[in-house]
Image (cartoon, rainbow, N blue to C red):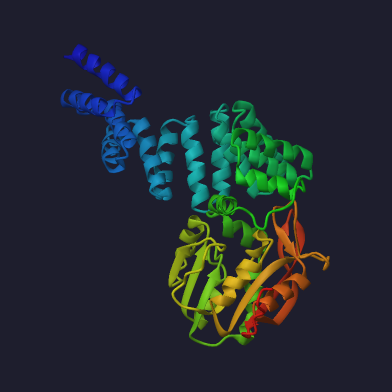
Amino acid sequence: MKNECEHILKQAALAHAEGRLADAEKAYLEILKAEPDSGSVLNALGTVFLDQAQPDKAKAYFEKAANLNPPSLSACYNLGRLKQMAGDDRGAIHIYRAIVKQQPRFGLAWNNMGVAYREIGDPEEAISCFRRAVAFAPDMAEAWNNLGVAQDEFHMVENAASSYRKAIEIQPDYASAHFNLGVSLQKLGQFKAAGDHYNKVLAIKPGDAAAKFMLQSLGTSAPPDAAPAQHVRRIFDQCAGTFEKILVNDLQYQTPERLFNLVRPHLKQDLTVLDLGCGTGLGSQFYRPYAKFLMGVDVSAKMLQKAAEKNTYDDLIVFDILQDWTFSHPFDLIYSSDVFVYFGNLDPIIRSASSDLVHGGMIAFSVEKLEDDSTGYQLFPSGRYAHSHRYIRECLKHHGLAPVEETDAVIRKQSGDEVKGLLIVAKKTGNERLPT
């Protein structure tokens, strides 16, 4: 019987490797009739169901193998991956902790645990896990790239660049590592070297919008009207878990509160409010007491998941600001903090906002300030746009909006330096100028 099971196991493994998943499933189930507590077979069958896009069935077999004595560590690892895929990062961390307790040098488990810690907003634990991952699995390019991302979040830019270089050394066609290294080099002022890596991304992934955009931010060609939506989505999906801890606690980010203080004298009760590019909902706590209905929209689904945890919104929607606005009702107030920096040409946004405001409604927003009033807007090597005061005023006027509050402000810090901006509150007057 043992020889027969070994023969069937070989057939199952071959069928699995060749993609004949139904044959592999049948063979593994046959073996389990004779060896129901075989951890390796239970795990293998789970992976077959995973490959068949049946995660619930896969989970059942991984759990059975994980609960054996001793447990199948491979099944535990796969169960952790499934929990991460389902958004249960804390559950995944619990499993990975158990794995590394039994097998401390399991680099993949350390790497995945680091990703899970980033998702729950614990960057210190994340960077600790990634460091262990590269120590125990020095040839894992993904772990080096993840370590670089974590180091970037702690403003360890040179260390991050070294980690990205290590990932590329291991995997020369690693597009994400080339892109990330380009961004790090750009922060360090090494623009030519940064451009070289963006061009490598384009060689690996022709037409990559983010790499093209970052090249444009270096002045290699005329800038586009806005950053690509997928680029902005990737930025904020990646940092959603750690966004508030780093931005608020470490960088003392206060733009949402400063903008609210500017608009507050004009607020009434029972307003219908739109938080445009709401992110994790940092400003929602200020506006909630005035709102009978508060909607948040953002291009990043992961940021919206974090915003939902605050329980301050009546509705949250994944939304690209440049798409057609099809909201079911107009708003009394639209506010937007540190969002317009990803758009050069603000005319489509202001036009949409004006169309979706009630008469006398207001829009409040922040922009990075361009000191040269002879230019409307400019894309900087930071990958963000700055706008002149004159441009903002003309854009508002063109769409029937009149400023009621304006002030200079520090809108954020970048590489330790203060970034100067403008906070604007404008009211819809209804005196739109028709396009010529």
Q: Quadrant of the N terminus?
A: top left
Instruction: Tell me residue 336's x, y (percent).
Output: 60, 70
Q: Is residue 89 above or below residue 315?
A: above
Q: Is residue 223 above or below residue 47?
A: below
* Quarter-of-image position of residue 159: top right
Q: Nearer the viewer, residue 240 or 434?
A: 434
Q: From this viewpoint, is residue 156 visible?
A: no
Please report the residue visible at 64 percent of the width from the left and 27 percent of the height from the top: 169
Q: Number of marks in the image? A: 0
Q: Is residue 213 above or below residue 21?
A: below
Does 316 sit left or right of 75 as displayed? Answer: right
Q: Nearer the viewer, residue 155 or 188?
A: 188
Q: Is residue 263 above or below residue 12?
A: below
Instruction: Tell me residue 421's x, y (percent).
Output: 74, 67
Q: Quadrant of the C terminus?
A: bottom right
Q: Nearer the viewer, residue 272 or 3?
A: 272
Please report the residue visible at 54 percent of the width from the left and 40 percent of the height from the top: 129
Instruction: Tell me residue 342's x, y (percent).
Output: 65, 59
Does 348 sit left or right of 413 as displayed? Answer: left
Q: Nearer the viewer, residue 44 or 236?
A: 236
Please report the residue visible at 40 percent of the width from the left and 40 percent of the height from the top: 81
* Quarter-of-image position of residue 85: top left
Please report the residue visible at 60 percent of the width from the left and 26 percent of the height from the top: 170
Q: From this viewpoint, is residue 186 visible?
A: yes
Instruction: Tell me residue 302's x, y (percent).
Output: 49, 55
* Quarter-of-image position of residue 163: top right
